Amino acid sequence: MSHLSERPEKPVVGVSMPHESAVQHVTGTALYTDDLVQRTKDVLHAYPVQVMKARGRVTAVRTGAALAVPGVVRVLTGADVPGVNDAGMKHDEPLFPDEVMFHGHAVAWVLGETLEAARLGAEAVEVDLDELPSLITLQDAIAADSYHGARPVMTHGDVDAGFADSAHVFTGEFQFSGQEHFYLETHAALAQVDENGQVFIQSSTQHPSETQEIVAHVLGVPAHEVTVQCLRMGGGFGGKEMQPHGFAAVAALGAKLTGRPVRFRLNRTQDLTMSGKRHGFHATWRIGFDAEGRIQALDATLTADGGWSLDLSEPVLARALCHIDNTYWIPNARVAGRIARTNTVSNTAFRGFGGPQGMLVIEDILGRCAPQLGLDPRELRERNFYRPGQGQTTPYGQPVTQPERITAAWQQVLDEAHFTDREREIAAYNAAHPHTKRALAITGVKFGISFNLTAFNQGGALVLIYKDGSVLINHGGTEMGQGLHTKMLQVAATTLGIPLHKVRLAPTRTDKVPNTSATAASSGADLNGGAVKNACEQLRARLLQVAASRLGSNASDVRIVDGVARSLGSDEELAWDDLVRTAYFQRVQLSAAGYYRTEGLHWDARTFRGSPFKYFAIGAAATEVEVDGFTGAYRIRRVDIVHDVGDSLSPMIDIGQIEGGFVQGAGWLTLEDLRWDTGDGPHRGRLLTQAASTYKLPSFSEMPEEFNVTLLENATEEGAVFGSKAVGEPPLMLAFSVREALRQAAAEFGPKGTGVELASPATPEAVYWAIESARQGGTAGNGGVRGAAVSDGGRARSGAKALSGA
């Protein structure tokens, strides 16, 4: 076992414990960025001047009336920016734009003594606009050939030969919606400037170092004049990876110009209408199968809705292409990607970061093609799994390690869910109930862990031991409720060999750990855990030398367990606190900067080849649903999940992440329906679902009635911190099983072997139309999966080809 993976005697990692801030969360004492305003004197409040048109050229911004409003102190415009008027890493997001690019785009910001004064001031600002034509939908952009950013193509094998060898060929297209992050805490920042001109920003950000970088170049100062701290976030889900930077820059600019602290916080409507969302996608595809239902070739084009600027659209698209295979071996593939430019908010990172979109495409294809092939969807999926010992690689050329875990997790779900017995029970139920139908579906997950951009796969930490033996950790990751800080406390205590109560964790700050990567890509525990472990190992090595001199032995024979140092073969002991005090008086350094970089990664974005991921997270889920044939309404009766987190660092945290990720995925796929005004009236481009009253989120009523989550056992991940695996994003894709169960239940309303198209999100309305389609014979020849294979007794005849448009 590798040094990084090996666990010592009596580790604190692997022990189930609550979130380190759980008590503060439930008692309301946990502080968030906007709570700090109450502890700060003379704060000014920032409020946006939004233009409620989808697109137009700004010809004038008149601020005189706003400055006359009592309590208004200043109006910030582009003329006030001393540095670069841009809030994006791609330099395509003007902080104060000359052209409005989406409905609700802010062109100026008002600073007021109170939030109400700032709001009234914003209403008084006059903006003249020359309206311009706008593209609101993904279809609009595709029709207008409106794209921006890279257009990658991923190729593998010989696609033309693969189709020529296929017994069945199907084509189709699929469009699916984005998703609103709807974190509990909206975007917030508090900026202050000290007597030396040092800017200090409290920000609800997943990427403090990048917030620091953007603020510095807006202010025109070096990075060492800006410090960013993230105390904690009330949720992030990727929505606070790139989007907070411009908001923090507004607060910092206001503080710099007025000399007073500036508070920024979006209300819920502003957050929904001004910040980006998960990318919606459109896919066109052609797939070939052999006579046994094994994939021979795939040719697809994925179009992401990027919104008005690039933000993170290029890496999101790249990850979508890299995950279109999911758990399936595709010997010949050609997948092209492009980013549509629309006049909506700039879409951004969201849990899974493009992976869910790519994986949804292949799962939808298999769900639609299985009836056409005369195969049970479970059987079709199983036949196409990556297999051990075959030397199979992904379409981008990375060997698939641990493919046996795909089958192991899958089989464990089948066993624990009593899948076969329940299928028989469901068949009997459906035969006896003409107006309600049940279905049971199983899907798997293979998700690559690491940032696609290799440089981001590094982490830092600073660990301090004080003379009394207490320990303070600083690391580069941010806490958004996912339990990262809890795991880092466990990693530090385990590495040092001390009880958990000896260790405390400081808020994430750019002046403690520099140049950090975003807490994203499910890499927080891997990168920061590796760095914390490295720092603690440096300290432990120094302390072992001190202990050895006191115990009269070699350092290699000393162990520190439960806060006590002992030498092998001796009963003599040295308590941790005494050991630390001795080290201090011997002038031994009691602080260490830790560092970790993920080894073995390489990626060529130009050729779309390489091994961008350290490992793959694996999982499987079985979901049973019941659908009402009159309304399309449904309920989730039972969910069984087996998920691979390696050797869990903190099992209670990991199970919570799996449950939460699954429910959030089910929300994206079944409930959350973003709608814009696409008409040509005065409100064109306006987000219509801009509150919880119109945007449906999963709640307790959507939770499975029975919810079973099991962590895959004997799953040590070699070369990862204490043998663990990432858990943040992969469970979201387990919710594919919900959508596939709904598809199968809708098909039960039609003749045997019926296949149906199902929109995404699969709202009750969408399920109802799928039911109606099933009653009319399904999607064959109905604009869905085009080209049905010739059938023979319910099975696709060997050698028959189903060619669309031929």
Image: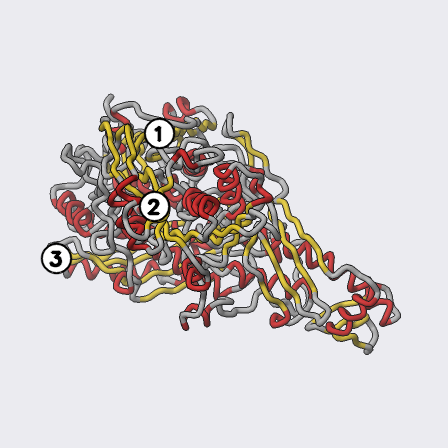
Mark 2 to mark 3: distance in Å? 58 Å
Query: Residue 242, can we see it?
Result: no
Q: Quadrant of residue 456?
A: top right
Mark 2 to mark 1: distance in Å? 44 Å
* Residue 35 horizontal/vertical position (percent): 42, 62
| Residue, disc 1 | 301
Q: Quadrant of residue 167?
A: top left
Q: Residues within 10 Å of mark 3 (few under 14, many from 20)?
A: few
What's the residue at 55%, 44% (across, down)? 401
| Residue, disc 2 | 110
Tell me the mark number nearer the camera, choosing from 1 and 3: 1
Task: Inspect the image, locate mark 2, and give the three-letter code of the amino acid beneath it.
Answer: Val
Whether residues under marks 2 and 3 lie with C-beta atoms below 8 angstroms apart, the answer is no
482 lies above or below 110: below
665 lies above or below 88: below
Closer to us: 644 or 561: 561
Task: Inspect the image, locate mark 1, and give the three-letter code of the amino acid beneath it.
Answer: Thr
Q: Quadrant of residue 1?
A: bottom right
* Residue 692 horizontal/vertical position (percent): 25, 55
Mark 3 secondary-structure assignment: loop
Q: Residues within 10 Å of mark 2 (few under 14, many from 20)?
A: many
What's the residue at 49%, 61% (across, down)? 483
Mark 1 to mark 3: distance in Å? 38 Å
Query: Residue 227, can we see it?
Result: yes
| Residue, disc 3 | 435
* Residue 442 horizontal/vertical position (percent): 35, 52
Closer to us: 802 or 135: 135
Chain-order first, disc 1 or disc 3: 1
